[in-house]
């Protein structure tokens, strides 16, 4: 890829369909020169339920980018999320001759490319967790060390192949080719976590509309990840059911809610008038906060429990970073702090991402920005070999 060649990314989310275009500025540096988004159609819980409608959404954003910004694109990277995403750890073994050589590292790397995924799954991300040699684990770089049995541990993130193909079909319907697919949680992390954050042990939680992705880093590596099928739309639905509102009314009312319940919030929230409610109708702010606090508290607690069960919670001493549209919720940082302890903050884009300084809420665009960063890296390191090897190369630089 030439330095001046633009790159593009697509996110078909539950709430919004987003396309962004960036110009590479150098390794790990991009300038987002244009982006467009519209409310999504044909998407539920981060998964496409109507390819035709989703394709129309993609086409509409493309037309907007062309008419308003003059950009016409035919190829983009895809950010993938949803509860169909899973993670697994793999261990690859290789017999060495006395001393670990560069050839040994290449061989065990090549063997690790055979992920052992079932035919209906597709690889989205992979992270190196460390090497082992003759029973000694936790080795960062075994080259030159003496031993016989070399092991490589990797963390693999994979999704349902059919769901990824659905997104690809929606893009194709809009005459947009998908270059590669990336795990949305990892994308968001790339956009807001610095190398220092990843080394210190930091948890990224991306609060989307239909699902919530989380990615844990320690010692500079991704050590765990996951997706929960709960997001901002579920909070909206809870509000709708609790107060007998329409979906649009519940979405409007939710913006006044707090993720933390406080007896001191004694006011009332006005309900937008509709056929279902008279003008001037209100609900108790404390009642609203109770509903929102229950759902968000449960969400954070489940993430914490999953990290604890995976044995990585104690390694996350660098705190928690929140991104996504759900990070706009009032006092959501305070709620997360009460559940996880330690430092919690809303994510800010890393210095390598330029062009969004004037955006109203950049953390909401973390996923699309990170997709651009990963696509830039992959394009710079594009392999002439098979696609699977290419995917592994972008996450194992220097192999």
Image (cartoon, rainbow, N blue to C red):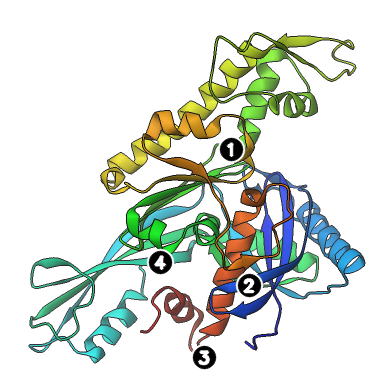
Assess whether mark 1 and mark 4 are in contact (beta carbons under 8 angstroms): no
Label 4 residue SS: strand
Q: CA distance from mark 3 to mark 1?
A: 39 Å
Of the residues under marks 4 and 3, which one precedes in the sequence? Answer: 4
**For mark 1, does the 10 Å Cα neighbourhood hold few (<14), some (14 to 19), or many (20 or more) residues?**
many
Q: Earlier in the sequence, mark 4 or mark 1?
A: 4
Note whether 203 is above or below 173 in the view shown.
Answer: above
399 up-or-down from 345: above or below? below
Q: State the residue at coordinates (90%, 16%).
A: 275
Q: Name the residue beneath numbered marker 4.
A: 126
Marked residue nearer the N-terminal end (2 or 1): 2
Please tell me which residue lies in front, 165 or 123: 123
Could you tell me which quadrant the C terminus lies in? bottom left
Q: Where residue 384 is drawn, which disc sits there?
A: 3
The reply to whether callout 2 and callout 4 are in contact (CB within 8 Å) is: no
What's the distance in space between the residues labelled 3 and 2, CA to CA?
24 Å
Residue 367 in percent (x, y) is at 60, 56
- According to the picture, the residue beneath numbered tag 1 turns out to be 231
For disc 4, the neighbor class at 10 Å (few under 14, some 14 to 19, many from 20) is many
Work out whether residue 355 or residue 40 is closer to the camera in this orientation and state it: 355
Pointer 2 with pointer 1, Cβ within 8 A: no
Q: CA distance from mark 4 to mark 1?
A: 25 Å
In the rendered image, which residue does mark 2 sit on? Answer: 30
Quarter-wise, where is residue 279 in the image?
A: top right
Where's residue 65, x and y in %? 84, 65
Of label 2 and label 4, which has the lower sequence position? 2
């Amino acid at each position: 890829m030439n330095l001046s060649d633009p790159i593009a990314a697509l996110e078909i989310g539950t709430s919004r369909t987003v396309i962004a275009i960036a110009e590479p500025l150098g390794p790990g540096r991009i300038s987002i020169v244009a982006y467009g988004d519209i409310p999504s159609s044909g998407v539920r819980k981060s998964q496409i339920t109507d390819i035709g409608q989703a394709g129309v959404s993609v086409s509409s954003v493309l037309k907007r980018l062309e008419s308003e910004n003059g950009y016409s694109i035919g190829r983009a990277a895809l950010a993938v999320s949803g509860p169909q995403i899973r993670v697994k750890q793999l261990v690859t073994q290789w017999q060495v001759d006395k001393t670990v050589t560069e050839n040994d590292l290449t061989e065990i790397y090549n063997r690790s490319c055979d992920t052992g995924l079932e035919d209906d799954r597709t690889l989205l991300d992979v992270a190196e967790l460390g090497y082992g040699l003759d029973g000694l684990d936790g080795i960062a770089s075994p080259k030159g060390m003496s031993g016989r049995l070399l092991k490589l541990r990797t963390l693999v993130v994979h999704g349902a192949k059919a769901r990824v193909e659905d997104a690809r079909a929606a893009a194709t319907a809009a005459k947009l080719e998908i270059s590669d697919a990336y795990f949305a949680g990892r994308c968001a992390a790339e956009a807001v976590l610095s190398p220092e954050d990843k080394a210190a042990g930091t948890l990224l939680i991306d609060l989307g509309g239909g699902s919530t992705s989380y990615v844990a880093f320690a010692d500079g590596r991704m050590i765990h990840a996951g997706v929960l099928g709960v997001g901002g739309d579920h909070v909206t639905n809870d509000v709708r059911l609790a107060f007998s509102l329409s979906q649009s009314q519940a979405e409007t009312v939710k913006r006044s809610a707090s993720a933390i319940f406080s007896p001191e919030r004694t006011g009332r929230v006005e309900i937008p008038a509709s056929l279902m409610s008279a003008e001037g109708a209100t609900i108790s702010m404390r009642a609203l906060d109770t509903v929102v606090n229950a759902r968000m508290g449960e969400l954070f607690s489940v993430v914490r429990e999953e990290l604890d069960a995976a044995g990585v919670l104690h390694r996350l001493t660098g705190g928690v970073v929140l991104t996504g549209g759900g990070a706009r919720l009032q006092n959501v940082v305070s709620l997360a702090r009460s559940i996880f302890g330690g430092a919690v903050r809303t994510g800010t884009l890393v210095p390598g991402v330029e062009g969004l300084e004037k955006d109203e809420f950049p953390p909401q665009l973390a996923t699309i920005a990170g997709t651009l960063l990963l696509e830039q890296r992959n394009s710079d390191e594009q392999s002439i070999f098979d696609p699977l090897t290419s995917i592994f190369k972008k996450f194992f630089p220097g192999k």
